[in-house]
Image (cartoon, rainbow, N blue to C red):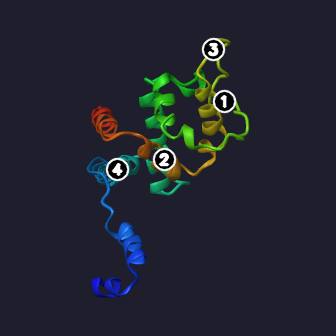
Amino acid sequence: MSEMIQKLPIDLSRKICNYIACPQPAALMEDIRNYRSSYDEILSNYKTRCKQFEHIESSLTLSCRAHHWVTNDLLRYHNSNRPTMYGYLPKIYEIFGRIEPIWDHKMLPAEYLYQQAPPRKKRRPIAWYRIDCYISRYWLQKPPQNQVRIFWGLMTPVERRAFAKYMEGEMTH
């Protein structure tokens, strides 16, 4: 392949080399590797756990049940075991706030149904309202597999390890 690139005009070969040989930051690569391995591990643990309850939830596939449980436990864990129908705590806003700047500014308004109580009358950061819009109008409408992947991707490797350790303790009780 290098012989073919050498035959190309120098400007074109530089452009191609930028796409081929542009190394990514080590921290990003570690985060990507951690995402994949920890996602597979946590999903495997949940699938094992879901097999115990097949007689109760037989209408969904094993993978779908596992993703439903992971989504529920991720929200529960990051909301300090507080039901989301009473609102989200700052940790949830911190996690979803990591992608808030790239959202379209013309989002639909938030739907405060059974999932979350409307915000109290006190002032909150404007980003929190946009996060409420994203969660209620977009994220909760996605299949549970996508919800887990998005949430898992927004978490840092430290948060993923802490969640896995916490849930490991929960599953043994």
Position of 7 relative to 156 (above/below) = below
Dot 2 or dot 3, earlier in sequence: 3
Whether residue 56 is visible here, answered yes or no, is no
Q: Residue 124: x percent and y percent?
A: 60, 18
Residues at marks 3 and 4 touching, judged by CB atoms closer than 8 Å:
no
Residues at marks 1 and 3 touching, judged by CB atoms closer than 8 Å:
no
Q: What type is the residue that disc 3 sits on?
A: Arg
Dot 3 or dot 4, earlier in sequence: 4
Q: Mark 3: few, some, or many residues within 10 Å (few <14, many ≥20)? A: few
Q: Which residue does the numbered mark 4 point to in the structure image?
A: 35
Q: Secondary structure at mark 3?
A: loop
Circle nearer the viewer, 2 or 1:
2
- Give the Cα separation between the discs numbered 3 and 4: 35 Å
Q: What type is the residue that disc 2 sits on?
A: Ile
Q: Which residue does the numbered mark 1 point to in the structure image?
A: 114
Whether residue 123 is visible here, answered yes or no, is yes
Image disc number at residue 123: 3
Residue at coordinates 65% horizontally, 14% vertically from top-left?
A: 120
Q: Which residue does the numbered mark 2 point to in the structure image?
A: 150
Task: Left or right? Give the position of 111 relative to 94.
Answer: right
- Give the Cα separation between the discs numbered 1 and 3: 22 Å
